[in-house]
Image (cartoon, grey):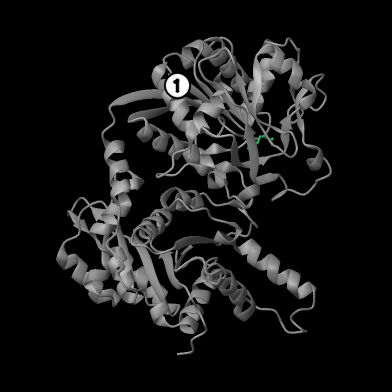
């Protein structure tokens, strides 16, 4: 078998039978276990769709767009990877078919293929393999987990499966392991778990030249030893490589369930990785213990316009889980559609909430409802956190109702407003192309002493991730500050207002950046922790 020089070991995670089985959570859980054994692990997601990135996708289509430090607009699974591992991902961690083809077609236009016919095999598969190896070749990781989006058998994911087949051959089978995630449907009439869909799905992988080493079986009932033996026999895997993945009450339980099933051990055995020490999962267990046994409970209103699809606000939801645990409290989110809030019903809609969060977003729809909710929070001393568009709406609300600037708005919603308190950033004005063109990724922010932001962070310099085109219009800053809304966080290089807060209020904070992208199990985000604390005190 030909071996090319490789420093990292590769784990491929494929999915069969149906989509939405939770490949992302299984990948992140395995990564967590290997990390807790002292290995440096990263996870990469290969998405078979033709969009270059999910940045231009409607959140209703694909859920939240997650943003990395280096400004990649990515699949929301990368959020899970970061929340579990507490290590940042980057551009290289999310690859789409659009990106692969774009690279190959650009090379073809440059004449790099020297007149050859450019084909799926070898040119597309070569580019896929190059992208898979990229993270391993940095020397930063001992193990790279590559999650292949979609379901085996989809036309779209075929080139990825083929690339994996070739790569295993090239790097040698002790450097690669294939985990196939499948579903065992439960037939309540006969009281049985059925294995046939799993057998068929493995057969399909075999047709493509891949023998999975490990089967992770999603199931709602425990698997008997006989059932495991049967699957092992039909699918040519060891019985200890048939892993049960029983439905869990929270995704944060899955690493411990996988540890019990010894998924990490089976992987290490196949990869001939020495056991440095047993997994150290104590901090994780403490987190889970607190998550399952909260001593208090609060209700937070989450106001947005994509609330029909909870995945559209994935990172915010998870940030509340982390911040809730930090406060030993259960945060119940009350989802409120911004289009349904008006002056007449705002009181009844928001009554009984301990705090209000206004979510990020784009475009006009539901804006006035957000502004009305913010006015209510400000006037009634309800703790408030506005994120990105939520912060911009807080600025508009303050301009209209405190500064008396009638018709004040963001130029995103009203290009001709007399008082453009939120305006397009200068650098954005000449940009016409969509996708990857916003102000993206991590930028520094200086915090003002004596503010709520400072008491949350406890330091003067922070860096947070962004995804926006509009900003606070500094021409109005003096009037805002004189009236009681201060800028407590500012970009040191450009003067861009990153955080606003209302002085005479228990906790009213708006942030231009997205704190939710940086909250992890081990490091809950300080703004969310303080916000939940303020809600508890309300
Ligand atoms: N639409 C606003 C902007 O582009 C806010 C973006 C957001 O909430 N992510 O500035």
Secondary structure at numbered mark 1? helix
**Residue for point 55% across, 28% down:** 454
Q: Image quadrant of residue 101?
A: bottom right
On the image, the x and y values in percent for residue 397 come to 66, 17
The answer as to whether callout 1 falls within 8 Å of ligand 1 is no
Q: Image quadrant of residue 123?
A: bottom right
On the image, the x and y values in percent for residue 476 come to 77, 21
The answer to whether any part of residue 481 appears in the image is: yes
- Residue 435 left/right relative to 310: right
**Residue for point 53% across, 43% down:** 517
Vertical relation: 494 (above or below) 61: above
Regarding ligand 1, which quadrant of the image does it lie in? top right
The answer to whether any part of residue 149 appears in the image is: no
Q: Which residue is mark 1?
A: 534
Q: Image quadrant of residue 368?
A: top right
The residue most toward the bottom is: 1
- Residue 212 left/right relative to 513: left
- Residue 130 left/right relative to 198: right
Q: Quadrant of the N terminus?
A: bottom left
Vertical relation: 288 (above or below) 169: above
- Residue 243 left/right relative to 483: left
Vertical relation: 325 (above or below) 385: below
Is disc 1 surrounded by few (<14), some (14 to 19) or many (20+) residues within 10 Å?
Answer: some
Q: How many marks?
A: 1
**Residue for point 47% across, 83% down:** 169
On the image, the x and y values in percent for residue 501 come to 60, 22
On the image, the x and y values in percent for residue 180 come to 37, 67
Q: Quadrant of the C terminus?
A: top left
Q: Name the residue nearer the viewer: 515 or 67.
A: 515
**Residue for point 47% across, 60% down:** 43
């Amino acid at each position: 078998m030909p071996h090319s020089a490789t420093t990292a070991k590769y784990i491929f995670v494929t999915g069969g039978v149906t989509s939405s089985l939770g490949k992302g959570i299984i990948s992140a859980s395995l990564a967590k276990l290997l990390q807790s054994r002292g290995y440096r692990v990263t996870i990469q997601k290969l998405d078979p769709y033709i969009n270059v990135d999910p940045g231009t996708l409607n959140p209703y289509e694909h859920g939240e767009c997650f943003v990395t430090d280096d400004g990649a607009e990515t699949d929301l699974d990368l959020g899970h990877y970061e929340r579990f591992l507490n290590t940042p991902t980057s551009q290289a961690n999310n690859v789409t078919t659009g990106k692969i083809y774009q690279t190959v077609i650009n090379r073809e236009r440059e004449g790099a293929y020297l007149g050859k016919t450019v084909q799926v095999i070898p040119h597309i598969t070569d580019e896929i393999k190059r992208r898979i190896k990229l993270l391993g070749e940095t020397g930063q990781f001992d193990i790279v987990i590559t999650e292949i989006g979609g379901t085996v058998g989809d036309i779209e994911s075929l080139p990825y499966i083929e690339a994996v087949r070739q790569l295993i051959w090239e790097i040698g089978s002790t450097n690669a392991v294939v985990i196939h995630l499948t579903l065992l449907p439960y037939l309540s009439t006969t009281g049985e778990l059925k294995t046939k869909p799993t057998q068929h799905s493995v057969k399909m992988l075999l047709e493509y030249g891949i023998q999975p080493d490990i089967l992770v079986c999603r199931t709602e009932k425990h698997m008997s030893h006989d059932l495991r033996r049967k699957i092992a026999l039909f699918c040519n895997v060891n019985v200890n490589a048939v892993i049960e993945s029983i439905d869990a009450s929270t995704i944060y339980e899955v690493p411990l369930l996988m540890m019990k099933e010894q998924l990490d051990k089976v992987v290490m055995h196949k990869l001939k990785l020495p056991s440095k020490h047993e997994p150290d999962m104590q901090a994780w267990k403490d987190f889970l213990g607190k998550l399952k046994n909260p001593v208090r409970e609060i209700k937070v209103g989450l106001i947005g316009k994509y609330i029909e699809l909870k995945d559209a606000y994935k990172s915010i939801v998870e940030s509340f889980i982390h911040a809730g645990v930090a406060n030993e409290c259960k945060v119940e989110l009350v989802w409120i559609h911004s289009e349904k809030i008006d002056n007449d019903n705002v009181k009844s809609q928001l009554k009984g909430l301990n705090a209000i969060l206004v979510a990020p977003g784009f475009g006009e729809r539901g804006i006035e409802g957000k502004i009305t909710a913010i006015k209510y929070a400000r006037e009634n001393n309800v703790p408030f956190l506005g994120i990105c568009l939520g912060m911009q709406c807080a600025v508009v609300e303050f301009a209209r109702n405190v500064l008396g600037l009638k018709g004040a708005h963001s130029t995103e919603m009203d290009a001709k407003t007399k008082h453009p308190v939120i305006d397009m950033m200068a650098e954005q004005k000449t940009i016409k192309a969509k996708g990857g063109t916003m102000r993206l990724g991590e930028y520094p922010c200086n915090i003002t002493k004596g503010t709520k932001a400072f008491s949350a962070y406890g330091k003067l310099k922070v860096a947070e991730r962004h995804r926006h085109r509009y900003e606070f219009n500094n021409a109005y800053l003096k009037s805002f500050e004189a009236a009681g809304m201060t800028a407590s966080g500012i970009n040191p290089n450009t003067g861009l207002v990153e955080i606003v807060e209302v002085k005479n209020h228990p906790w009213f904070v708006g942030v231009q950046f997205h704190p939710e992208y940086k909250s992890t199990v081990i490091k809950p985000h300080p703004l969310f922790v303080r916000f939940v604390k303020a809600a508890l005190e309300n």
